[in-house]
């Protein structure tokens, strides 16, 4: 799959909050995920598709209500994809909040090999 097609599919999945389908279809088995910083819930870096899928399931389990997800159109430079993602979300036992971030993905051999989030 070409980077442009991966970007379109990824944005479509993110707009629906369907992280699991994105992981299954678009990610390499050795992909890595990098958060801006470690938290009590998540390490800063997660390596391997199975671990990334578990991270996504854990995040979904922490959500009380997803009110809205805004995802910009992707920017593509070579094998790099970037877009903004803002979730209007209420996490369990937390007040409602908006979490804007810049998402950057690297593609190699038709699969996403890394994702990194910036706040």
Image (tube, helix red, strand yellow):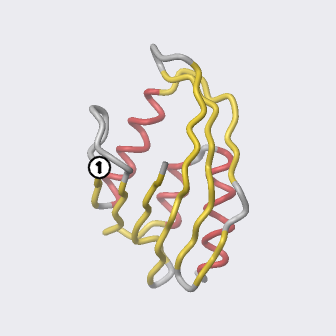
Q: Is residue 102 above or below residue 91?
A: below
Reading the image, the residue beneath label 1 is: 44
Q: Residue at x 45, y 84 (%)?
A: 109
Q: Residue at x 56, y 86 (%)?
A: 78
- Is residue 67 rendered to the left or right of residue 22? right
Residue drawn where x is 73% and y is 62% of the image = 73
Q: Residue 37 appears at what percent x and percent y?
A: 32, 46
Corner quadrant of residue 58? top left
Considering only vertical position in the picture, is 16 above or below 29? above
Residue situated in front as seen by the camera: 46 or 48: 46
- Figure quadrant of the N terminus: bottom right
Q: Which residue occupies the extreme front position in the image?
A: 119
| x and y percentages locating residue 68 in the rendered image | 70, 34
Question: Is 109 in front, or is 45?
Answer: 45
Bin the neighbour count of mark 1 within 10 Å (Cα to Cα): few under 14, some 14-19, many 20 and up: few
What kind of element bears circle 1? Answer: loop
* Residue 100 position by quadrant: top right
Does residue 61 appear to the left or right of 65 in the view shown? left
Q: Position of residue 67 (x, y in %)?
A: 68, 28
Q: Position of residue 72 (x, y in %)?
A: 71, 56
Tell me: 19 left or right of 85: left
Instruction: Please say if 115 is above or below 79.
Output: above
């Amino acid at each position: 799959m070409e980077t442009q097609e991966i970007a379109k599919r990824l944005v479509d999945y993110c707009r629906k909050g369907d992280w699991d389908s994105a992981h299954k279809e678009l990610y390499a088995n050795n992909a890595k995920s990098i958060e801006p910083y470690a938290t009590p819930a998540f390490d800063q870096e997660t390596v391997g598709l199975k671990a990334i899928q578990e991270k996504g399931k854990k995040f979904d389990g922490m959500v009380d209500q997803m009110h809205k997800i805004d995802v910009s159109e992707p920017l593509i430079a070579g094998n790099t994809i970037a877009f903004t993602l803002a979730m209007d979300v209420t996490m369990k036992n937390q007040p409602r909040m908006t979490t804007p971030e810049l998402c950057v993905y690297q593609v190699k051999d038709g699969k996403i090999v890394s994702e990194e989030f910036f706040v």
